[in-house]
């Protein structure tokens, strides 16, 4: 228990993935950087989306990074929490909507 | 019981608490240590040397920033001045007169009044009216807003500012109560809103008004300010929508790791990460535009510094024959090397930071 699986300082080593495979890493980081640039969506909107997605995929590194980013961009705490609720609602909804599948199956199998 | 003690404590400056970070040597020890001592992070001097700009020198003094005293009605957590109601250092009229003479004789166009709460200096109004008489082009007052409501004698400050066409620059860390009050103290947000309304009522900050009202945003924690234009748009939209308040520009300012903000960084275990973030965000263009290149800072005792931060670090200007306003020598000051240390990274991160906001 004294050794956590995720270590905060490992986020800084992200770029080191290039040590094992430089070409793909370079492509990834280039693409990643471009994705977050100001575009049809503002950088701020993208950071909020990223924060929500981070929670959906439950990546602690992404949560740290996009919490910092959204704070920096002046996103309010209420907005940040609403974004997390959006992620939660989609996740919850995604489970629940499969209830229909369950019901279909029940109906098919039952008299 | 605990909350009670905490409240009392928070009304005192580091100096009043005899905190070790109230001592300059302690702050410099922190700023020289850690990742900078073992070379894992470059010092600010390394960076400036790398650019071939060491020693950093002024371009030309255009702004005189006068700290009228460290007394303040607030005790904000991030305050680099360590200001508070318990601070007694205050500038007298004699030195104000010398400053007026300098303003008259030189082509320094801006008089930037700061503190503490500059309005608490008993000679504040005299100084402003005299500065107006000698023809200072731009008189800035850095107001914490709440002072206007702190006591009856300040209620007419908005009218006084307007009569003298003072340029008001006010701090407002965020457009909601929670974040503002956590940084500046309980009740500060609602008083700030009331004060802004009073300023708007006399014409300050209104769309085509010549009475300039700008706001200062500084992050309420261990992170850098975001894009100035974007934040300005947010502040404008939200302050208008929620409170029907108008202002002109928003200046984003980075918190420098000295005094109470340094104390906060250490206590919250954010110091190392914050310094690393600042170093990583070093922007050479911002470094060429740091405010110490066109501003001189004066303390309550008439001594001069490269900036208000160096003032708090007691690093007087490196112009041995012109360290005091009594010996003001423009040429000597314009030739001086600027004192730099790791706190300077706060001025050069990202889009840069100065008392007029971003510098790039
Ligand atoms: S930040 Fe400004 S208002 Fe707050 S304590 Fe310091 S001088 Fe006073
Ligand atoms: S802290 Fe002062 S001396 Fe250092 S770069 Fe900023 S303005 Fe210049």
Image (cartoon, rainbow, N blue to C red):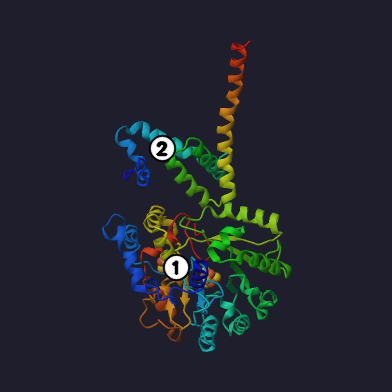
Instruction: Write down the chain letter for disc 2.
Output: A
Which residue sits at x=52%, y=89%?
B94
Disc 1 vs disc 2: which is toward the camera?
1
Residue on which disc 1 sits: B260
Residue on which disc 2 sits: A29
Residue A32 quadrant: top left
Residue lying furthest front in this view? A111
User: Callout 2 environment at 10 Å: few (<14), some (14 to 19), or many (20+)?
Assistant: few
Q: Position of residue B249 (x, y in %)?
A: 61, 61
Foreground residue among B190 and B54: B190
Q: Position of residue B23 (x, y in %)?
A: 37, 74
User: Callout 1 environment at 10 Å: few (<14), some (14 to 19), or many (20+)?
Assistant: many
Secondary element at image label 2: helix
Q: CA distance from mark 1 to mark 2?
A: 38 Å
Disc 1 Cβ-to-ligand 1 distance below 8 Å: yes
Disc 2 Cβ-to-ligand 2 distance below 8 Å: no
Foreground residue among A103 and B199: A103
Examine the rendered structure and indicate whether residue B321 appears above or below residue A64.
below
Would residue B243 be found to the left or right of residue B275 on screen? right
Foreground residue among A87 and B231: A87
Instruction: Write down the chain letter for disc 1.
Output: B
Secondary element at image label 1: helix
Which residue sits at x=53%, y=77%?
B85
Residue lying furthest right in this view? B201
* Visible residue check, residue B253: yes
* Visible residue check, residue A40: no
Q: Position of residue A78 (x, y in %)?
A: 59, 49
Q: Position of residue B344 (x, y in %)?
A: 40, 64
- Label annotation for residue A74: none
Residue B139 quadrant: bottom right
Tell me if label 1 and label 2 are in contact, CB under 8 Å.
Answer: no
């Amino acid at each position: 228990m004294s050794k956590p699986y995720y270590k905060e300082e490992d986020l800084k080593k992200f770029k080191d993935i290039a040590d094992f495979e430089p070409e793909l890493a370079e492509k990834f980081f280039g693409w990643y950087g471009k994705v977050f640039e100001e575009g049809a969506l503002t950088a701020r909107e993208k950071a909020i989306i990223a924060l929500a997605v981070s929670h959906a995929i439950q990546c602690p590194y992404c949560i740290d990074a996009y919490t910092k980013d959204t704070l920096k961009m002046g996103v309010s705490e209420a907005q940040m929490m609403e974004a997390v609720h959006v992620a939660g609602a989609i996740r919850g909804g995604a489970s629940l909507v499969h209830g229909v599948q369950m019901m279909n199956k029940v109906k098919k199998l039952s008299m | 019981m605990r909350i009670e003690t905490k409240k009392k404590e928070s009304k005192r400056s580091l100096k009043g608490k005899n905190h070790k970070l109230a001592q300059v040597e302690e702050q410099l020890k922190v700023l020289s240590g850690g990742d900078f001592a073992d070379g894992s992070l470059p010092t600010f001097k390394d960076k400036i040397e790398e650019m071939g700009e060491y020693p950093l020198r002024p371009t030309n003094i255009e702004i005189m920033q006068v700290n009228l005293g460290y007394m303040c009605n607030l005790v904000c957590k991030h305050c680099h001045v360590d200001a508070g109601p318990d601070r007694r250092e205050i500038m007298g009229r004699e030195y104000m007169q010398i400053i007026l003479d300098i303003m008259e004789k030189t082509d320094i166009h801006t008089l930037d009044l700061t503190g503490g709460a500059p309005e608490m200096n008993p000679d504040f109004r005299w100084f402003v009216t005299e500065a107006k008489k000698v023809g200072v082009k731009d008189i800035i007052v850095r107001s914490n807003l709440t002072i206007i409501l702190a006591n009856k004698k300040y209620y007419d400050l908005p009218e006084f500012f307007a009569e003298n066409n003072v340029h008001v620059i006010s701090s407002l860390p965020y457009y909601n109560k929670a974040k503002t009050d956590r940084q500046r103290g309980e009740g500060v947000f609602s008083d700030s809103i009331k004060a802004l309304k009073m300023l708007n009522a006399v014409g300050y900050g209104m769309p085509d008004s010549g009475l300039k009202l700008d706001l200062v945003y500084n992050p309420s924690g261990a992170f850098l300010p975001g894009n100035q234009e974007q934040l300005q748009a947010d502040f404008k939209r939200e302050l208008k929508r929620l409170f029907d308040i108008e202002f002109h520009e928003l200046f984003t300012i980075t918190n420098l790791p000295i005094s109470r903000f340094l104390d906060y960084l250490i206590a919250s275990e954010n110091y190392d990460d914050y310094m690393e973030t600042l170093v990583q965000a070093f922007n050479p263009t911002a470094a060429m535009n740091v405010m110490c290149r066109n501003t001189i800072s004066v303390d309550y005792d008439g001594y001069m510094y490269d900036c208000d931060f160096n003032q708090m670090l007691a690093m007087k200007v490196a112009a041995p024959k012109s360290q005091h306003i009594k010996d003001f020598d423009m040429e000597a000051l314009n030739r001086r090397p600027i004192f730099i240390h790791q706190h300077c990274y706060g001025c050069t991160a990202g889009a840069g930071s100065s008392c007029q906001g971003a510098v790039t």
